[in-house]
Amino acid sequence: MTRATLILLLVLSVGAGGCGIAESLAGGGEVVRVYSGRHYDLEEAFEEFAGETDTSVEFLFGGDAELRERLRTERENTLADLFMTVDAANLEIAASEGLLQPIDSETLDEVVPEHLRHPGGLWVGLSKRVRTIMYHPDRVDPSELSTYEDLADPKWKGRLCMRNSTNVYTQSLVASLIAHHGYDEALEVVSGWVANETEIIANDIRILETIAAGGCDVGITNHYYLARLLEEDPEFGVKPFWANQDGRGVHVNISGAAVTLNADDPQLAGDLIEWLATDGQEAFVYGNHEYPVNPEIEPPPLIRQWGDFKEDPLNASEFAALNADAIRLMNEAGYD
Ligand SMILES: [Fe+2]
């Protein structure tokens, strides 16, 4: 096997702040370059791909807005062949700004479910992150729980913790409510959460810790944050509840990838994306306890115990395209 070659171009801090060269290893063979807003587990996956294919992978980590700004200003001079990030809304914004080109891949059409891919091939989901209801098992009987919409019921007053409105995960969940119910009905749901004096917490881990400590009974977070806490402490006292199982299914978001408009080597970029959706699925999803998009791959062990769930079949590009409406709606509802 060829020695894995990997070059970390530069690490940009998220938000304001400086940047610096973090790591640089010698490269060989063809080079594929990645701009990534996703930070989890990529190095291991890239190293494996590089080793298997005699390719060098160079990557640059950064905040999503920063990386899109780079793609916009660099235009045809960009080094990036791939743009990778978390949350379909971030991919959709890049698509709508004309920064991406379609991927034509029978493999991806086969192994990635249709609702987790852009209908025009502009981006593709590579892992699933389930944003669902979390509860304290001593303070809530799971039979009391049902849907995101039900959390607007006055019986939950003073018992809820949720994420802030500037967070893209919250925006995508609310956008999915708009897609299913229309703006006015979705506004009623979110206004109900506000009327229930929901405590807004700007961090999913802190939401789970607050539930565990009895500060609230129920919250909404991405599933893998609970997995991380359970990995540290198997007795951590919060349970997941798959939302909306009697209806459309739980809200599923993605982490995904796209080929940039000005990629030097779109073919090689597509090869890396195909590899991540097939042979590289485990390397890509296991470290962060995410669900594979490829149904042939088993979920990581820790989250397998939570069992199967029905997922909302709404195409991720549909809720992603409603991002601005979701922000407006939360503002109108007085949701912080
Ligand atoms: Fe996250």
Image: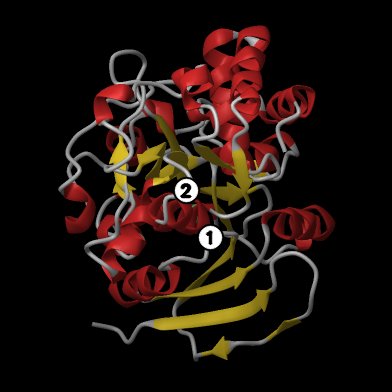
SS class of the residue under badge 2?
A: strand
Name the quadrant of the N terminus.
bottom left
Residue 243 horizontal side relative to residue 141, left or right: right
Foreground residue among 112 and 229: 229
**How far apart, in angstroms, are the residues tagged by discs 2 and 1?**
8 Å
Say what amino acid the circle numbered 1 marks: Arg
Instruction: Give whichever of discs 2 and 1 has the lower sequence position.
Output: 1
Identify the residue shown where x is 60% and y is 87%: 22
Say few, some or many: other residues with alpha carbon within 10 Å of mark 2 (under 14 / 14 to 19 / 20 or more).
many
Q: What residue sits right under mark 2 in the picture?
A: 255
SS class of the residue under badge 1?
A: loop
Say what amino acid the circle numbered 2 marks: Ser
Name the quadrant of the C terminus.
top right
Q: Which quarter of the picture shows residue 293?
A: top left
Q: Which quarter of the picture shows residue 98?
A: top right
Give the percent coordinates (x, y) of residue 43.
Answer: 43, 74
88 above or below 20? Answer: above
Are the residues at dot 2 and dot 1 in contact (C-beta closer than 8 Å)? yes
Q: Which quarter of the picture shows residue 271?
A: bottom left
Give the percent coordinates (x, y) of residue 55.
Answer: 41, 74
Q: What residue sits right under mark 1 in the picture?
A: 38
- One can see residue 298 in this view: no
Give the percent coordinates (x, y) of residue 161.
Answer: 53, 41
